[in-house]
């Protein structure tokens, strides 16, 4: 076995096991990433992995979503998320902060810490934005909605502006609670976000 590895190395050819190892992409998120109310195979990470593979990318998407998580929860368990040593981290957090009317400044501070630590791990990082519901007023909306672009600009990471684009508020694409995407809704999310994720995959693959 050792002689075989030396032979491959001498020829400048990586052994198949190293050559074929998939890129690991961790989705650090809440119930929308975890797949609340859906079979595992219909959750966002599974469908994103399938879409990326259809486009020819050897990627394993890790479901690091936890239902009910706020940005503080994501921050607290980030070391666990990074333990798999993902080469890519897609951060999808903040929806539960907005639903609970939490201080946008604290949400921004939590996400700032997550992005800082994820980048420090060597991962290529992407941020998925969220929009606040209107019931807390225009001022709250402006403060919350603007934090994602500020963070993306600060950390120089790609931003997908609204994770639920094309799905939010559409009863046909959400479960009965009106806030968690149905299987059909997940498909729309994946269709819309996959070009942006693919660009990040190509960036990480070239490192």
Image (spheres, helix red, strand yellow):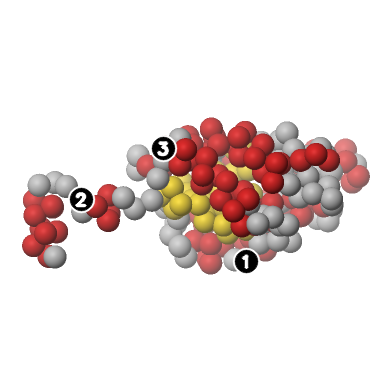
Looking at the image, residue 102 sits to the left or right of residue 24; the answer is: right
Left/right placement of residue 139 relative to residue 81 reads right
Note whether residue 123 is visible. Answer: no
- Residue at image x 53%, y 62%? 81
Tell me which label, 1 or 2, sits earlier in the chain.
Answer: 2
Q: Which residue is mark 1?
A: 76
Q: In the structure shown, which secondary structural element does the residue marked by tag 2 occupy?
A: loop
Circle 1/circle 2 CB separation < 8 Å: no
Left or right of 126? Residue 103 is right
Q: Is residue 33 above or below residue 186?
A: below
- 191 lies left or right of 167: left
Q: Nearer the viewer, residue 47 or 125?
A: 47
How many other residues sit within 10 Å of disc 3, few (<14), some (14-19) or many (≥20)?
A: few
Residue 145 numbered tag: none
Q: Position of residue 152 (x, y in %)?
A: 59, 40
Marks 1/2: CA–CA distance: 38 Å
* Foreground label between 3 and 1: 3
Q: Give the camera-side residue of 157 and 13.
A: 13
Q: Please report the residue visible at 63 percent of the width from the left and 43 percent of the height from the top.
A: 128
Label of residue 14 in the image: 2
Asked which secondary structure carries label 3, the reply is loop
Query: Which residue matches tag 3?
Result: 56
């Amino acid at each position: 076995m050792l002689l075989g590895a030396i032979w491959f190395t001498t020829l400048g050819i990586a052994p198949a096991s190293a050559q074929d190892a998939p890129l690991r992409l961790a989705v650090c998120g809440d119930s929308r990433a975890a797949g609340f109310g859906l079979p595992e195979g219909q959750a966002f990470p599974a469908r994103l992995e399938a879409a990326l593979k259809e486009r020819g990318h050897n990627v394993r998407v890790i479901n690091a979503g936890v239902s009910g998580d706020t940005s503080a929860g994501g921050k607290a368990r980030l070391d666990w998320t990074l333990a798999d040593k993902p080469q890519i981290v897609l951060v999808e957090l903040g929806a539960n902060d907005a639903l609970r009317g939490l201080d946008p400044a604290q949400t921004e501070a939590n996400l700032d810490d997550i992005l800082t630590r994820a980048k420090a791990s060597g991962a290529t990082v992407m941020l998925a934005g969220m929009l606040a519901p209107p019931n807390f007023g225009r001022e709250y909306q402006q403060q919350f909605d603007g934090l994602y672009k500020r963070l993306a600009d600060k950390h120089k990471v790609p931003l997908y502006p609204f994770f639920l684009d094309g799905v939010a508020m559409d009863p046909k694409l959400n479960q009965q609670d009106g806030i968690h995407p149905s299987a059909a809704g997940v498909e729309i999310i994946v269709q819309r976000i996959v070009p942006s994720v693919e660009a990040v995959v190509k960036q990480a693959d070239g490192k």
